[in-house]
Amino acid sequence: MDGRLIIDNKRRETKDKLVSKSPATLEPVGEVSLASSAECRDAVLAAKHAFPLWRDLPLAGKKKILRRAKAILLARSDEAARLISLEKGSPVMESLAAEILGSLETLDYYGRHLDRAVRPKRSRPHQPLLAHKKSHFKFQPLGPTLVLSPWNFPFLIPLCDVVSALSVGNTVVLRPSTSTPLVALFLGEIFLEAGLPPGVLNVVNCRTAQAEEMITDPEIQTVMFTGSVGTGKRIMELASRNLTNVVLELGGKDPMVVCKDADLERAARGAVWLAFMNSGQSCASVERVYVAEEIEKAFTERVVELARSIKVGNPLEPGVDMGPMTTLGQLRVVEEHLQDARSKGAAVLCGGEKPDGLPGYFITPAVLNNVDHSMKIMTEETFGPTLPIMTFYELDDAVALANDCAYGLTASVWTCNRKTAAWLAERIEAGSVTVNDHMFSFTEPKAIWGGIKQTGMGRSHGPYGLHHLVNIKYVSSDFARKKGLLWWFPYRDPKPRVIQNALRLLHQDGMGGKLKASLALLPSLSMVRAGVSFKSLLKIAARFFRR
């Protein structure tokens, strides 16, 4: 795998190197170049210089490149999945099903529907006196975008952010996590092969100091970041120096509410997969379960049974369900949360141990009960293979527990009752709520991604997420054959009387007052000559009769 930087469509080698290691075996996967301050600046300038060309490239040209990228990724999908598994530690099955499939769907969606996402939208004036104007909203790119991507989904997350930015006409500098640098370079290779013009996507592995220099570079117009709350706050602070637009996704502590009428087998299987896939290293994984008292015992027993059946091992071996944690630091966080829970009375029903004979950052999937909100495992993002289960007695209690959290990314409700599902979904505080499923919305291109509270700000993906990456410009035209408008100078009679009566006609309650105002306006037909169009008069009349 080529570990050189990608700047202005050229591969660039540097003296400063980083060795990427497998979290499963702790053996080297490859060596990558690290960008200096000068090379990071070159990447930003390349994105700046490429911006006018990419912005003005017709949509058909952009869509063609995205479709080519999809075809290339499909042809190299096995290679991509193996690299993801090597560098991140997820089983090949997961790399294919989550990262590769989700990426292909994203490329397919924008490759087909890009014009819908950025098409100008007509806006009819609400104000009757402006009815003759032709108005619309335009969605225009802002310029070079800095994407700071994480290690937990090192292909899917940066690809979705990069494609979102590119789709609306922005250029991109991608700075990936130093834990998974080779996967990001592979992503860059795909777009190079797809024919992306020079400078439109630049991939620079670099240290934190250089990343912060790019955040404060005045040429960067948007920063998209996925990661921790602490780092997100630092990025916001740095971005404030230039009032740079930011989109921040800073994690979650996602609740799963299991009602007494839920399909117990589906809910148990869902909980186990949603808590332990990717070794629990997902912003949207199930990190806490609230289950109705009536089914708590049966649900917990089935969850423990399923968790014990998960095969933990080298992600490249067939039949392995769960690989290692990606970083030693995150493994330590999981161990700390488990110890804190035990010390406060939680029972670890299974897991939470290092399996024998495996050299990497492994830990077995842990299921806990007797937990409460005094424990870190119920209130702080664990980001690992833990599943704490807590009982609730009334639906109001479930809502209160679900909302008793600093995060608000996603949540799920498990019930066979549609009214119960709607009631809970309305009250749970989150960016997305799903019923009888969880976490899939990131890989649904039409969905939106983001949350509230400490989860961050802004949205990405889908038609609404793209609005955070553009300048929404209001454009209005007036080609009426008038020399001026009613409210322009001079302010002589009959204009003041016309305005007063127009106010009453448009906004006074009661038909009597409206009729009186309309009769008072009749002698002032000179208002048409004073700059009120016939179309505006019709709209005034329509509002009169509507009220």
Image: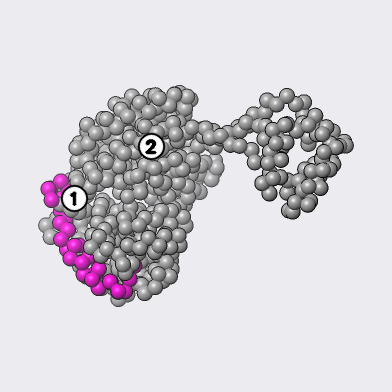
Q: Which residue is mark 2?
A: 162
The answer to whether any part of residue 157 appears in the image is yes
Residue 299 located within the stretch drawn in magenta: yes
Q: Label 1 is placed on what type of residue?
A: Ala
Q: Position of residue 403 (x, y in %)?
A: 43, 64
- Chain-order first, disc 1 or disc 2: 1
**What span is in magenta?**
290-319
Q: Nearer the viewer, mark 1 or mark 2?
A: 2
Q: Position of residue 467 (x, y in %)?
A: 49, 40
Residue 260 located within the stretch drawn in magenta: no
Q: Position of residue 272 (x, y in %)?
A: 24, 60
Residue closer to the observer: 276 or 49:
276
Q: How far, Cα to Cα, is label 1 from label 2? A: 28 Å
Structural crowding at the residue carrying mark 1, measured as other residues with C-alpha within 10 Å and reported as few (<14), some (14–19) or many (≥20)? many
Q: Position of residue 489 (x, y in %)?
A: 82, 33
Label drawn at residue 24:
1
